Image (spheres, rainbow, N blue to C red):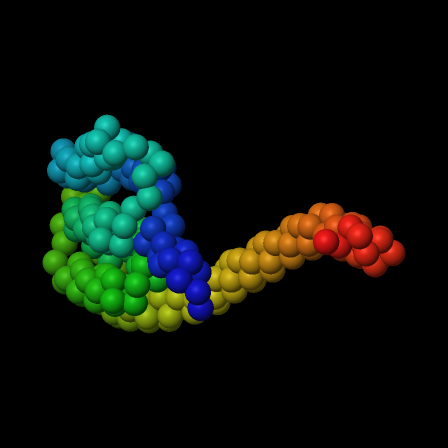
């Protein structure tokens, strides 16, 4: 593959495909969802939450978003390491919020799959494995250690142990299967995209060669016409000289 093509594909690394603006918008959506869930649980369902600590955790995400918006341009494309740190931050922030709101007794634990799926789709295999292992450790910890959910009357809301074990098993299987599935789909899409880029570059080179051939043909024609005229005139002059020997001296 020519050097120019290699340089193009080198610049098309997965981690560089995501803009900071995309991450920021997704995080704002997550923040709104978290605040809404806290409000509904506290005010409508009467669940006694550690509201101050929960708001502190959400506030950390808000501060992170504001800092990223101020420091970096929204059009910035994140590197592999920056993407990994962003996704890891979201995973840890969500994990801490789940710790304060019942662990795996909180049905929103399924959202832990989100960061792992993002990694499988856009980051390297090493980053995906790292986040998958991290998510597995977090799920295991949350299944045993968390702040229990309590109603305002003091009743503890707890999932039966059998179902809790089922939730733990299900999310571990989901982390493995969905990560593999997402990565396979992403690899297929990236392969098709790379093949399309290579085809476009080959066609572009062919077009340039065709244009160059046309220029060469036109130049040959332009040069050939006066040369043919000169040859014809020279031949006529030679014939004239043959008819007038006196001029040859």
Q: Residue most toward the top?
A: 70
Q: Nearer the viewer, residue 159 or 88?
A: 88
The quadrant where residue 154 appears: top left
Left or right: 236 in relation to 42: right
Q: Residue at x 38, y 58 (%)?
A: 7
Q: Nearer the viewer, residue 151 or 93?
A: 93
Q: Nearer the viewer, residue 205 or 152?
A: 205
Provide residue 172's location: percent of width, then percent of height. 29, 69
Residue 97 seen from this side: yes
The quadrant in which the C terminus is found is bottom right
Q: Residue at x 84, y 53 (%)?
A: 244
Q: Nearer the viewer, residue 1 or 225?
A: 225
The quadrant where residue 31 appears: top left
Provide residue 13's location: percent of width, then percent of height. 35, 57
The image shows a total of numbered marks equal to: 0
Left or right: 233 in relation to 186: right
Residue 189 seen from this side: no
Left or right: 243 in relation to 131: right
The quadrant where residue 59 appears: top left
Q: Residue at x 35, y 62 (%)?
A: 120
Considering only vertical position in the picture, is 92 above or below 184?
Answer: above
The quadrant in which the N terminus is found is bottom left
């Amino acid at each position: 593959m020519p050097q120019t093509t290699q340089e193009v594909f080198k610049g098309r690394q997965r981690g560089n495909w995501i803009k900071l603006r995309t991450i920021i918008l997704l995080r704002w959506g997550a923040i709104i969802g978290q605040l809404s869930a806290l409000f509904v649980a506290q005010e409508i369902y009467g669940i006694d939450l550690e509201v101050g600590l929960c708001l502190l955790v959400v506030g950390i995400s808000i501060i992170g978003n504001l800092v990223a918006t101020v420091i970096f341009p929204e059009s910035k494309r994140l590197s592999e390491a920056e993407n990994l740190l962003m996704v890891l931050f979201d995973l840890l922030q969500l994990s801490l919020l789940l710790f304060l709101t019942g662990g795996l007794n909180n049905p929103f634990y399924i959202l832990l799959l989100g960061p792992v799926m993002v990694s499988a789709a856009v980051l390297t295999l090493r980053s995906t494995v790292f986040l998958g292992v991290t998510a597995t450790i977090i799920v295991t910890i949350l299944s045993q250690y968390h702040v229990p959910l309590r109603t305002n009357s003091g009743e503890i809301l707890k999932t039966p142990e059998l179902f809790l074990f089922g939730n733990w098993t299900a999310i571990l299987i989901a982390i493995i299967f969905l990560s593999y599935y997402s990565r396979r789909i992403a690899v297929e899409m990236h392969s098709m995209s790379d093949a399309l880029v290579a085809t476009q570059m080959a066609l572009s080179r062919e077009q340039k060669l065709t244009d160059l051939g046309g220029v060469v043909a036109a130049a040959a024609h332009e040069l050939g016409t006066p040369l043919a005229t000169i040859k014809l005139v020279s031949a006529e002059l030679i014939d004239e000289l043959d008819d007038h020997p006196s001029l040859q001296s």
